[in-house]
Image: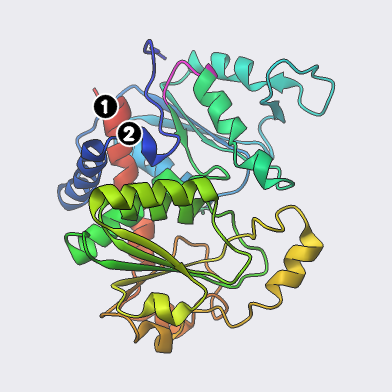
Amino acid sequence: MTPTASPRHLVHLGDLEQSELEDWIELSLSIKRSGAAPALPGRSLGMLFFRGSLRTRTSFEAAVNQLGGHAINMSAASDFWDLEAREGVVMDGRAPEHIRDAAAVLSSYVDALAIRPAPAGHSWELDRRDEGIHAWAMHARVPVINMESALWHPLQALADTMTMRESLGALAGRKLAIVWSHAPEPSSPAVVHSLLVAAARFGMNVSVAHPTGYELDGEVIRRAKNAAETSGGTVEFTSEREAAAKGAHVVYARSWRSIEHYGNTTLAASQRSRTAGWSVDEALMKLGEDARFMHAMPIRRNLEVTDEVLDGPRSLTLTQAENRLHSQKAVLTRLLGR
Ligand code: CP
């Protein structure tokens, strides 16, 4: 409600210097250990969901409330309408309001805005521009937080990095295997993009295994490789799950859409039908170095991972989900705390 001259946004983790990222992770761990100071009395967070969420919505709302603030949740399915992101267009389509106007109005009510956009899903070239979240960041007079766009999921990567730090200690030199998993409705690659770059920044040796045709975004790969060069980590890609899992300290499963056939549901389904073996089981986990299992959830049991692994002693999935609460308190404290 009291906008700053140039608000600080969190669209992706590239918005944070390495020292800030480390500080945010340390604060997240400290909040989990010792609790958080009530940093948000009298402050409000507006949350706009253009598609569904279980963890992000609940953990963020709980975090704001536990910090003494107030969260206002709005869903595009029930509370508002399509919003136009493009500049200079004649608005004779579905959207009756422009993000420019909605952002200006909401900035006069709340102290920060958290947005989960809904990518159109027709063209990767268009969706990867993340025009929706960038439009909010451009027009809001308060901090804008990305709750998962087409390209990035910074909040998940913060919780994942915190979880790995909590479980493994120092991350430099540890091996992270990111393993594509089969699911009938794969997600966007946003979770994996953010995780890949974050892990590379912390000096991890990242091996990404996926079937041919599921290559990640080229610009994201370039960022990850640059980060690894700076940190002393490595980034490699393989089509062999076993090669990625061998010697891994963490096996992270995720199903993501093919960028190659993005928007073509027929070709994408046909391509996916040839990937049935891509699942994580005990045999794969045993190739690791006392490997932990991670997944951002929601997760399809006995398709992406066996019950034995998911419910087993090395599964960190529930810790990851819990850590969303602690790490988002850290985000709110650093962006809004007094
Ligand atoms: N991992 C994650 O972002 O979960 P939700 O989609 O339920 O928010």
Residue 172: x percent and y percent? 21, 59
Asked if 207 appears above or below 10 in the picture, the reply is below
Residue 79: x percent and y percent? 66, 32
Q: Which residue is mark 1?
A: 337
Tell me how many marks there are: 2
Q: What secondary structure do most residues of the magenta stretch adopt?
A: loop
Query: Residue 295 magenta-drawn?
Result: no
Tell me where residue 206 sits by quadrant. Answer: bottom left
Q: Which residue is mark 2?
A: 332
How dense is the environment of label 1, judged by Cα within 10 Å: few (below 14), some, or many (20 and up)?
A: some
Cβ–Cβ under 8 Å for marks 2 and 1: yes
Q: Residue at x 26, y 47 (%)?
A: 230
The amino acid marked with disc number 2 is: Leu
Using residue 195 as the reference point, say whether residue 230 is left or right of it. left
Magenta range: 139-143
Tell me where residue 77 sits by quadrant. Answer: top right
Image quarter hosting the C terminus: top left
Q: Note whether residue 194 is visible.
A: yes
Image quarter hosting the N terminus: top left
Q: Residue at x 41, y 42 (%)?
A: 60
What's the image's color scheme? Answer: rainbow
Using residue 106 as the reference point, say whether residue 37 is left or right of it. left
Residue 100: x percent and y percent? 61, 17
How dense is the environment of label 2, judged by Cα within 10 Å: few (below 14), some, or many (20 and up)?
A: many
